[in-house]
Amino acid sequence: MKQKFLTVTIGAVACLWLASAQAAAPNPEFLGTWEMDLSKNQPSPGDPKKAPKRITVIVKDVGGGKWATEVTIEMADGTKQAQPSMPLRMDGTPTPVSDNPAIDSLTANSPDSNTVIVTARKDGKPVETETSKLSADGKRIVHTIDGTGPDGMPLHITQVLNKK
């Protein structure tokens, strides 16, 4: 359960931030430091002893119309895992992903400046769709993930991130 949660969380949050980078008219409120409100995750990650204690996401403008992120996960035992991202273009064409066995490309679009939709694919087939909605005041993001889990079962996750 711990590995599944971490894999989904790291991948999901990284996709969220990478995708928000290249929206046609991205809201600059996406930039900055965000902390996931773990009490609002649905479903709950399970055993609190195995679940993350804190997840922090830093979104940076790296120039050239690209953004990058760094996701840091602090576990209940105090150990930390950091996952930097590569910049993602958001022009509707697939962006290759080489370091994730569950996906091999991402496509992203932004129907409006406060919404980002990312589709993760494996072998050309969609395996996950993520929708991130920025609140009107720019202080909260509701991030939903729909797809197929590593066990082949349907997956639906809701995450809430608050601006720090």
Image (spheres, rainbow, N blue to C red):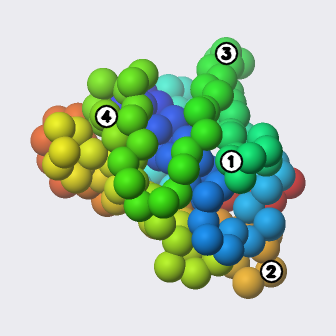
Look at the numbered disc 4 and give the secondary structure of its residue: loop
Mark 4 belongs to which amino acid? Asp
Residue 152 shows up from this direction: yes
* Horizontal arrangement in the rendering, residue 109 relative to residue 54 (left or right): left
Query: Which is nearer the N-term, disc 3 or disc 4?
Result: 3
Which dot, 3 or 1, sits closer to the camera? 1
Which residue, given by chain and number where applicable, does mark 2 sit on? 137
| Amino acid marked by disc 3 | Thr
- Contact (Cβ within 8 Å) of mark 2 with mark 1: no
Looking at the rendered structure, the kind of residue marked 2 is Asp
Disc sitting over residue 79 in the figure: 3
Q: Closer to the camera, 11 or 75?
A: 11
> What separation in Å lies between label 3 and label 4 (alpha carbons)?
28 Å
User: CB under 8 Å between callouts 3 and 1?
Assistant: no
Residue 66: mark: 1
Give the residue drawn at x 65%, y 55%: 21
Residue under numbered circle 4: 104
Task: Locate the N terminus and report the quarter of the image it occupies.
Answer: top left
Give the CA distance from mark 2 to mark 3.
33 Å
Say if 25 sits above or below 55 in the image. Answer: below
**Percent position of residue 150, x then y:** 23, 35
Alpha carbon distance from label 3 to label 1: 30 Å
- Give percent across and percent down for residue 77: 65, 18
